[in-house]
């Protein structure tokens, strides 16, 4: 799908603040509100915009522990692993990666016991290596569009 400069600007605006109204976007891209709404609908239908999310400060909710868990999962076990990991509420991201481990799991926890419990459960799929974050200098953010 071809996206033009206006589509890119709409994406940037929504990535920065998904609550921006079509009317506000229209003023910034010099189009009518219905034209902006149509472009957003098209971007959604084409799978370029896949959802709208609130950025949550987990520390404010008591989740003071952020951990990255490397997990070695055999290819034959992935069919069981994927449904399992999707059900774990503390897991905020799980990616299949290259290297010594096949999965990189990001999770947030209130207590070290919660993290320990998850690691113990994950070890049925393979060996783990856990890293705990002290701080995060760059949070998830939109990338610049070319």
Image: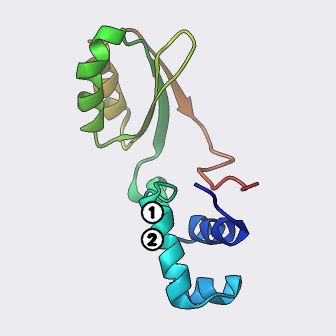
Task: Verify CB contact (< 8 Å) between mark 1 and mark 2.
Answer: yes
Residue under the image location 63 percent in, 45 percent down = 136
Name the foreground residue: 146 vs 79.
146
Residue 121 in which image quadrant: top left
- Residue 65: % across, % down: 46, 40
Please indicate, yes or no, whether residue 52 appears anywhere in the rendered image. no
- Residue 54: % across, % down: 45, 64
Residue under the image location 61 percent in, 66 percent down = 11
Q: Which residue is mark 2?
A: 41
Vertical arrangement, residue 116 with respect to residue 91, above or below:
above
In the displayed structure, does residue 144 sit left or right of residue 86?
right
- Per the rendering, the mark at residue 1 is none
Color scheme of the displayed model = rainbow
Name the foreground residue: 44 vs 25.
44
Which residue is situated farthest in the right direction here? 146
Circle 2 — which element? helix
Vertical arrangement, residue 135 with respect to residue 130, above or below:
below
Residue under the image location 69 percent in, 82 percent down = 29
Q: Which residue is mark 1?
A: 44
């Amino acid at each position: 799908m071809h996206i033009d400069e206006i589509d890119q600007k709409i994406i940037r605006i929504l990535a920065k603040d998904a609550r921006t109204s079509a009317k506000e976007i229209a003023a910034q891209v010099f189009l009518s509100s219905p034209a902006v709404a149509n472009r957003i609908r098209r971007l959604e239908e084409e799978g370029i915009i896949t959802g709208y999310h609130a950025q949550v400060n987990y520390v404010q909710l008591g989740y003071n522990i952020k951990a990255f868990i490397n997990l070695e999962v055999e290819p034959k076990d992935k069919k069981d692993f994927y449904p399992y990991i999707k059900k774990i509420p503390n897991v905020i991201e799980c990616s299949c990666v290259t290297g010594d481990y096949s999965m990189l799991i990001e999770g947030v926890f209130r207590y070290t016991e919660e993290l320990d419990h998850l690691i113990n459960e994950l070890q049925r799929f393979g060996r783990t290596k856990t890293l705990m974050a002290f701080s995060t200098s760059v949070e998830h953010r939109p990338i610049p569009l070319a």
